[in-house]
Image (cartoon, rainbow, N blue to C red):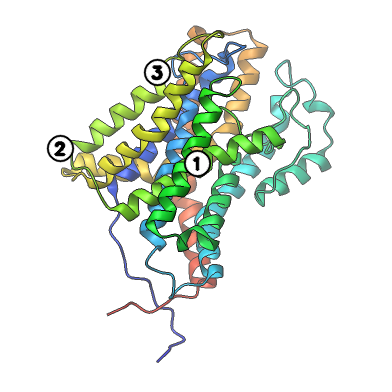
Amino acid sequence: MTSNLPLQFPQKPHYEILDGLRGVAALIVVVFHLFEIYAVDPLYVVPIVNHGYLAVDFFFVLSGFVIGYAYDDRWGWMTLWDFCKRRIIRLQPMVVVGAVIGGLCFYFGAGKMFPHIGEVPVWQMLLVMLAGCLLIPTTAAIRQPWHEMFPLNGPSWSLFFEYIGNFLYATVVRRFSKRVLIAFVAAAGVALLWMTVGGSDGSVLGGHELTGRHFGIGMIRLLYPFFCGLLLFRLGRLIRLRGGFWICSLVLAVILFFPRLGGEEQLWINGLYESLSILFVFPLIVLAGAGSPITGRVSVGICKFLGEISFPLYIIHYPFVYLFMAYVTEHGMGWQQSWPLMIAVGVGCVALAYGFLKLFDEPVRAWLRNRFLRHVPVQR
């Protein structure tokens, strides 16, 4: 018997520690991006938090695990279109906010850092902003000398690949048996090792430009961690640790803050470090985060807050980082002089992310769910 009334999926408990770890990684990404203006070429060595970009690979492991947990048992009740709508409703409202903020901030960044901004016509910026709202990559060179596929909000590139991962899961990989999935993940791991240890620069850094090379890097960075996370969920062998959130947060921070290894003559050493972190350490962190208990009002509250702000913070902070970069470049400031401004930008972004979460993201998502989702009956 069917009903026209909106019926809900069975509610599942949240993995609070995984939510908290996502927030920890997002905060470290903000710190990495604030220090990124002081990166030293040719190996792109960023002071203090050199491996902060690996947070993206950690996000992908988390995403794959959570996708499996949330949707593996819903196929049969849920169509492909239902799945797509749910993912769009979850991600797209804040993607739009990030693109609009990027457009509003764009012309304020004109100067030595981005000398061509003043030459970009408003109509072109608005078209790029519309593409960003729709998460359509572009080759429009409106932020020279950089050539990001989302030049108003650079980190959107990882959301673009996240959507690719979601689509591959929903159309093909969800049907894989455990053995086939293990073989698929193993092949992706070999590709990751080939890129980092045998590659040209001993790093996974890349994926943010719309070129063949960067698209290849982005796909390799997606395929292993995302589908490894799915495999971890399906295997179901979790790790239980006392104080799991704090231990996992510490290990994650050490991985992301660790200095670059080797030099120009030993690029493979850093590549090995990054590949081992992605291949083994990040999956172990996710297993421990999912399997460990969390008690105490303070710990639960911290994880809840960090989990709530993680995605809004990640997707709205970079337009302000562009402005920070432009300001310190214009005034010739080193990080020893700019750290108070760094703190102000970081804290401001956290506050703004929380405001957008409560005043925009949550209400809009609730409205979209009620308006567009075809709910299925709870199984009894």
Residue at x-position 65% and y-position 49%: 135
In this rendering, the answer to whether 233 lies above or below 140 is: below
**Which label's residue is closer to the chain start, 1 or 2?**
1
Q: Secondary structure at mark 1?
A: helix
In the image, residue 183 lies at what x, y percent? 44, 48
Judged from the image, the secondary structure of the residue bearing numbered disc 3 is loop
Task: Determine the CA span between mark 3 and mark 1.
Answer: 25 Å
Image-quadrant location for residue 225: top left
Residue density around tag 2, few if under 14, some if 14–19, many if 20 or more, within 10 Å = few
Disc 2: which residue: 242
Residue 107 image point, x, y percent: 73, 30
Q: Is residue 340 above or below residue 93?
A: above
Q: Quadrant of the C terminus?
A: bottom left
Which residue is labeled 3 in the image? 258
* Front label number (1 vs 2): 1
The answer to whether 203 appears left or right of 119 in the picture is left
Residue lying at 51% horizontally and 34% vertically, measured from the top left: 192
> Does residue 98 appear to the left or right of 27 in the view shown?
right
Which residue extends farthest bottom? 1
For marks 2 and 3, the one nearer the N-term is: 2
Question: For mark 1, does the 10 Å Cα neighbourhood hold few (<14), some (14 to 19), or many (20 or more) residues?
Answer: many
Query: Quadrant where the N terminus lies?
Result: bottom left
Q: Residue beneath label 1, please?
A: 188
The disc, 3 or 1, on the residue closer to the chain's N-terminal end is: 1
The residues bearing labels 2 and 3 have C-alpha atoms spaced at a distance of: 25 Å
Left or right: residue 156 compared with residue 17: right
Look at the numbered disc 2 and give the secondary structure of its residue.
Answer: loop
Image spot of residue 88 (x, y percent): 55, 58
Q: How many marks?
A: 3
Name which quarter of the figure residue 261 lies in.
Answer: top left
Q: Nearer the viewer, residue 343 or 130?
A: 130
Q: Where's residue 372, x and y in %?
A: 54, 71
